[in-house]
Image (cartoon, rainbow, N blue to C red):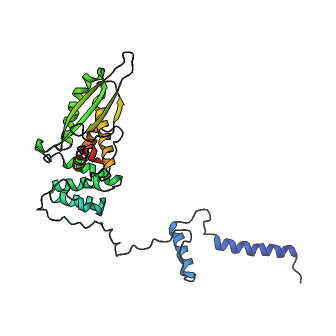
Amino acid sequence: MRVPIPVVILLILTVVGGSWWFNTRNMDFLTPPSSTQLEKVRIKVESSLPQVDRVADAISEPPALPVPETPLPPILETKIPVEIGNLTEPIVLKSYADVAPRGSAYLAELAAVLEEQSELRRSLLVWERVLDLTHPDDTQTNAAITAIKRLRPPLPIWNSNPQDAIPVTLHASTNKKNIKALIPVLGEVARDLERVSSGIIKVKTIVLAGKSSAKARSPSPIALWMSGPDSKSSRTAVYSFTVQPPKTLRQEVLKSVFLLVCGQLGRQKIYTVPPPLLDQQDPLDALNSHITRLAWSEFATSVNVPIKKLSSAKISP
């Protein structure tokens, strides 16, 4: 007996539809699952999979490595071992000159150690050796200048006896119009030089009046040079400048003196030429801190050598 095709189709639809309705009549397809339900599903799925050694989330960054329990070794502070020598020996202007060949860094460390032990006079001498007997870099030069400015003021002057001062003459030449303003300025500068040299030099001044032109409208030049006490003494080079007195006259004279002293020390080729005058720096400050007391003594000694003996004279450091 054949079953008609329409009946077969109806029976198939009835069986499929009835099975679907019977199994899904209590299910909610519209409400999203809760986090608890999702977690249960995730656990069920993971438990059914084989365990593999891999990161659970391939997208996430791998966990940070544990910090080692042993700390890294600290960076050691390197110091140059120095020998402070016999502190009972009397000091002289040339003290620690024999240590200068060891270099600027060694002298700087020695000066710091001496200052820690309250040996301020010795520390100052060592810092001065950095400037006048070695070739320091910019950092060492600045450290030496800073230390000299700090240590010198509270200490007594080196030479307190005017009779032992080395005579030096400061010469100036200009026209008669500048004489009146120049003479008192040179007197002040002379006292400044005696002070910054710590009493090592004694300065006198000589002003020469040149011819002046009545038609000249611009300021006349002023020529400066330094020498020993008399006409037979050696002298420095001549430095000229033009300035409208009394404006900045004293500053220009001090600047010129600084250049004259540095130039003379450079000619001797025994000591290191003092650090240059910086822009906008007070020349009196540079005369006090850039030129050491030993350099002042060397300068004054060099201009006191008679001219006829200058070529054969040998000055020991």
Position of residue 193 measured from the top left corner of the image (x, y, whole percent)? 22, 39
Tell me: residue 18, above or below residue 52: above
Residue 24 placement: quadrant: bottom right
Residue 274 visible in rendering? no
Taking the spot 33% from the left edge, 36% from the top edge, the residue there is 238
Position of residue 174 measured from the top left corner of the image (x, y, whole percent)? 31, 26
Q: Quadrant of the N terminus?
A: bottom right
- Viewer-proximal residue, 288 or 151? 288
Residue 167 visible in rendering? yes
Q: Quadrant of the C terminus?
A: bottom left
Left or right of residue 56: residue 174: left
- Viewer-proximal residue, 305 or 219? 305
Residue 212 placement: quadrant: top left
Residue 110 placement: quadrant: bottom left
Position of residue 284 measured from the top left corner of the image (x, y, whole percent)? 26, 38
How many marks on residues? 0
- Viewer-proximal residue, 73 or 282? 282
Tell me: residue 126, above or below residue 85: above
Position of residue 171 measured from the top left corner of the image (x, y, whole percent)? 26, 33
Q: Residue furthest front?
A: 308
Q: Residue furthest top?
A: 214
Taking the spot 26% from the left edge, 49% from the top edge, the residue there is 146
Left or right of residue 229: residue 1: right
